[in-house]
Amino acid sequence: MTLLLPASALAQDGPTIDVVKSELDTTWLMLATCLVFFMQAGFALLEIGMSRGKNAGMGVAKILVNFAIATIVWWAVGYGLTFGGTATFFGDSGFFLGNGTELAGEGVDAAGVGFFAFQLMFAAVSLAIVWGSTLERIKFGAYIIFAIAFVGVIYPLVAHMAWSGGFLTRVGSGVQDFAGSSVVHLTGATAAFAAVLFLGPRKGKYGPDGKPRAIPGHSMPLLGLGVLILWLGWFGFNGGSTFNTSGNKFAEVIAVTNMGAVGGVLGALFLIWVLTRKLDVGMIANGAIAGLVAITAPAGYVEMWSAPIIGFVGGLVVVAGVLAIEKKIDDPVGALSAHGLAGIWGTLACGLFTSERLAGEVGVGKAGLFMGGGAEQLWTQFIAVVVTFGVVFILSSIVFGAMKATFGLRVTEEDEDAGLDIAEHGMYGYPEQFIPAPELVGVGSSRPQAGTAAPIGSTSEVTA
């Protein structure tokens, strides 16, 4: 009988346009959430590839445990402190997601839970950035303690100030940071900077003359796969930050994001060739990351033509930054440059390239200096960079300093020599490289003890 009903009757019984739009928006946000979650795999492969074989397995445990802790802490306090109201520095509601009923005085529906999940992925990405600079010498317990402090206090403070009506939205014309060049990437890199200052370099990184020596990662294919996964995840990272499908703006943001990434690749390729006459794989990979980081803040504010320019400069910045920073600071994956310096550049780039049209669409700030808007937005972006760096560095230094003064941050020399896989986790990521095959030494032979393994060296010449 239903087939005989008039179409108008069926339309009256079906969902309204508003309901369909809301469901479509939520579906897109959940797809973007999944893409951003997949970035955890990208970070894992990138960091494992840039580690030596004796530390490869540690990266798996670190990614899984950090994401688990971030999720619990975000649910308990992080989300409420970030988005539970519009106070100057912290939100004051929505803890434990308001028990599923209320956040900042409003009911939490399916769309609200979706926003919670999406923003969790951002906090987890920022936390993941912290650890690339600390590879191969930090105690696993430090991950757990700092993850609680970072997701529970440090990240929510910065994100609230920029994204939830807090302090940085009230400075000048209001900070522009569409998806987090500053909030996510500079925050993570600044915490990493504090960590390495307390941690010190890996054993053997600097020679008797004080000059840095290359400690190559063991797998450039894993590095490349990690970067491509991150690149894919960034489409959800930036595109999802539209939060809806209205006007198909998310498609424009994704296209702009891709243009920024390719600009970063070409910028890094150009500068490393000029400086070394070699096409360094690690530098090119970091160029892609730097281009993506640089375009993250401007993604919703700039016209398509400016995206590759912003990315290209990001590629130049990361190469110059890695080479300069390596002279004094041991950063195995180049995170301080790719996420920190490129994050600063991306945040400032809004003050240069934001178009009046797109600033009006998003409803934040003004046009940039090169687009006829004067220097006001650039000044606002500069203040945001200074505030973000200062707040994160001070708070992170307090946490890392306290850990170092109590149970310590760094593994022993013996454990560092043996590798964190066996020293911290009791197994190797690549056991056949370190444990002789049973048919060669007799079935039942004992596993080498920590400090006795002789890792197989890498032949890669990449420095990043």
Image: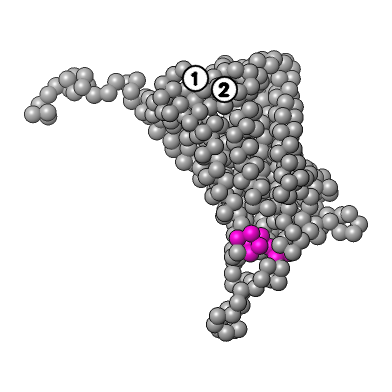
Classify 8 as above or below 412. above
Q: CA distance from mark 1 to mark 2?
A: 8 Å
Judge whether residue 114 is colored magenta.
no
Frontmost residue, 103 versus 288 = 103
* Residue at 70% from the left image edge and 52% from the top image edge: 138
* Residue at 57% from the left image edge and 84% from the top image edge: 442
Residue 257, percent from left and from top = 58, 35
- Disc 2 target residue: 91
Q: Say whether marks 1 and 2 touch (CB < 8 Å).
A: yes
Q: Which residues are the magenta region? A: 417-425
Please give left or right for residue 197 compared with residue 442 in the image: right
Residue 143, percent from left and from top = 63, 47
Looking at the rendered structure, which numbered label has been put on residue 104? 1
Q: Quadrant of the N terminus?
A: top left
* Residue at 54% from the left image edge and 19% from the top image edge: 85
Q: Classify mark 2: residues with Cα within 10 Å, few (<14), some (14-19) or many (20+).
A: many
Residue 272, percent from left and from top = 76, 49
Quarter of the image for residue 219 reads bottom right
